[in-house]
Image (spheres, helix red, strand yellow):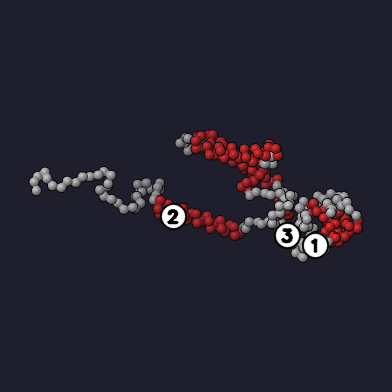
């Protein structure tokens, strides 16, 4: 072979001379600051997620969600209550400026502005500063939103009639009765059905089954009232009232 002749190697900078296998990089230069996504970081995420999931399952078993009676679309006296994380919006709709003719403001306009502002935050606040006191506007809006949500939630909890809500949603055994009977016809033709329900289940007034009252006590209540029930509600004849009182005194649920 003559000088200057022979094989020549052409190198390509796009191809590394020493190819390495797909192994995580060595992050020992940055102790405590970074780590390999697989498996180090992902494994930690799975462990934390599993801990929270197990804790949540234990909480749901120890404190099961309270159930209410089957929904009755004909019961216009029932007052629904949203879950706790929506109570602030529920309370907002009680105020004059966000209810009635202005209901669209409280239900759509105000929540829409809040969500829209949240979506625009990355475009309005482009500062690289991380300290809250160096970012007065975002910090101020965040504190204002937190205070408003906290106050409205607190007001909703304090002002809600929890005893009445519990009574309204209480699961009761159904009362068996003959809607064609003379006693029920008297009941249906009176004002009692408006407050105590068409199946004696209760609405504005309490349920009429298992009251433990005697016929005489029921007659007295019909004339003189009791609790929030005013006097003079019975407008029918005394004979009909006596028949109805005896019927209600013996009315039992599940029978």
Mark 2, residues whose alpha carbon is within 10 Å: few (<14), some, or many (≥20)? Answer: few
Q: Is residue 160 left or right of residue 39?
A: right
Q: In this view, does 249 lie to the left or right of 87?
A: right
Residue at (28%, 50%) from the top-left corner?
Answer: 19
Q: Distance between the residues labelled 3 and 2?
A: 49 Å
Considering every residue shown, the one lying at the far right of the view is 238
C-alpha gap between disc 1 and disc 3: 19 Å
Label 3 vs 2, first from the N-terminus? 2
Q: Is residue 38 left or right of residue 249?
A: left
The answer to whether residue 60 is seen in the rendering is yes
Q: Is residue 224 shown to the viewer in this render?
A: no
**Considering depth in this image, is 211 or 158 the residue closer to the camera?**
211
> Residue drawn 79% across and 54% down?
196
Q: Are marks 1 and 2 in contact (CB under 8 Å)?
A: no
Give percent across and percent down for residue 158.
69, 46
At numbered mark 1, what does the secondary structure look like: helix, strand or loop? loop
Residue labelled with disc 1: 178
Earlier along the polypeptide chain: callout 1 or callout 3?
3
Query: Which of pointers 3 and 2 indicates the residue nearer the eye?
Result: 3
| Residue highlighted by disc 3 | 172
Element type at mark 2: helix
The label shown at residue 3 is: none
Circle 2 residue: 43
Residue 57 position within the rendered picture, expressed as x and y whole percent measured from the top left: 56, 58
Q: Position of residue 252 (x, y in %)?
A: 79, 63
């Amino acid at each position: 072979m003559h000088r200057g002749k022979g094989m020549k190697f052409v190198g390509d900078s796009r191809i590394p001379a020493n190819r390495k296998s797909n192994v995580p990089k060595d992050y020992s230069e940055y102790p405590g600051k970074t780590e390999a996504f697989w498996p180090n970081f992902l494994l930690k995420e799975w462990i934390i997620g599993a801990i929270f999931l197990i804790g949540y399952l234990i909480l749901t078993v120890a404190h099961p969600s309270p159930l209410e009676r089957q929904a009755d679309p004909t019961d216009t006296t029932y007052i629904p209550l949203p879950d706790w994380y929506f109570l602030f919006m529920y309370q907002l709709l009680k105020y004059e400026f966000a209810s009635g003719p202005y209901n669209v403001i409280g239900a759509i306009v105000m929540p829409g502005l809040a969500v829209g502002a949240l979506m625009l935050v990355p475009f309005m606040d482009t500062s690289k500063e991380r300290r809250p006191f160096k970012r007065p506007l975002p910090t101020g809006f965040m504190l204002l939103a937190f205070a408003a949500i906290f106050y409205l939630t607190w007001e909703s909890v304090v002002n809600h009639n929890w005893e009445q809500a519990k009574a309204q949603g209480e699961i009761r055994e159904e009362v068996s009765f003959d809607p064609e009977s003379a006693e029920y016809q008297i009941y249906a033709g009176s004002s009692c059905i408006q407050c105590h329900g068409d199946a004696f289940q209760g609405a504005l007034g309490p349920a009429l089954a298992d009251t433990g009252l005697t016929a005489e006590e029921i007659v007295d209540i019909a004339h003189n009232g009791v609790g929030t029930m005013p006097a003079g509600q019975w407008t029918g004849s005394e004979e009909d009232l006596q028949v109805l009182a005896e019927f209600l005194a013996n009315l039992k649920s599940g029978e």
